Image (cartoon, rainbow, N blue to C red):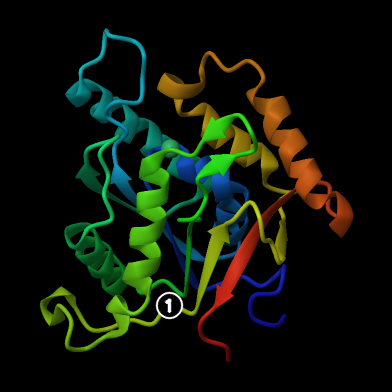
Amino acid sequence: MAKFDSEWVPKSAMTIFAHPDDAEFSCSGTVAKWAGAGCEVTYALITSGNIGTHDVKYTQTSLAVIREQEQRHACEVLGVKHIEFLHHDDGRLVADLVLRRELVHLIRKYKPEVVLCGDPNQLFWGNNRINHPDHRAAALAAVDAIFPCASMELLWPEDGPIHEVHGVYVRDMTFVDTWIDITGTIDLKIKALREHHSQLDDNAGLEDMIRQRSADAGKDHGMTYAEAFRVIRLKGD
Ligand SMILES: [Zn+2]
């Protein structure tokens, strides 16, 4: 299996997203598939989603505690080995040098062969939604940390020896070149999403939406269900 092909499984992977549940929506079918095949997966959560509710019974502190626990349960479902929470504040994320350095530290610590993240350029979803600014900031910080910062010896040497990420799986809605068959893991994706009770218990159409979206992604590629990515191939064999 050639590197980055649809059925290729990296030895290690890291997801970098802004909020609990972002990785589940974006790539958890792939995460569960890879983890089940022996890939060591690390989740990097930049915020703990501490303003992600319209229910005023929560405080920012109590919501963060609940959402971190929900994320841990989702990761158990998916077979994720490590979770790192960076505890930035939800709704105020900026792709600054503090965040970039924290991500460099995690990339050097866990040495992922591939990173999965969002698309920093995605400003709108269709014609009725604005992409959350935290999603854009998280994605920009991720790609800036991957290249060039994590791989430069003279930059932040106290954050560990350099590491070169081989590929970046970007959840890009406008350009896609790699489809991962998640037919065997879509049930785990839905189960992991359901662990985010504070976000999704009211979402009666969740399962149908995930199945429809995944079916649409796979239909031209002989897959019942798929997740689609733009893969940035930084390092070949
Ligand atoms: Zn989000």
Q: Is residue 15 above or below residue 210?
A: below
Instruction: Label 1, secondary structure: give it.
Output: loop
Q: Is residue 7 left or right of residue 39?
A: right
Q: Which of the pair 8/208 is nearer the observer?
A: 208
Question: Where residue 115 sits: x, y (%)?
Answer: 46, 65
Furthest-front residue in view? 127
Q: Is residue 43 above or below residue 149?
A: above
Furthest-top residue in view? 57
> Label 1: few (<14), some or many (≥20) within 10 Å?
many
> Which three-letter amino acid code belongs to the residue tagged 1?
Val
The quarter of the image that holds ligand 1 is: top left
Residue that mark 1 sits on: 165
Q: Is residue 94 above or below residue 193?
A: below
The answer to which image quadrant residue 47 occupies is: top left
Q: Image quadrant for the N terminus?
A: bottom right
Question: Where residue 132 sits: x, y (%)?
Answer: 43, 38
Residue occupying the point 73% across, 49% down: 184
Residue occupying the point 36% across, 19% down: 53
Furthest-bottom residue in view? 237
Residue occupying the point 53% across, 36% down: 192
Residue occupying the point 35% across, 51% down: 137
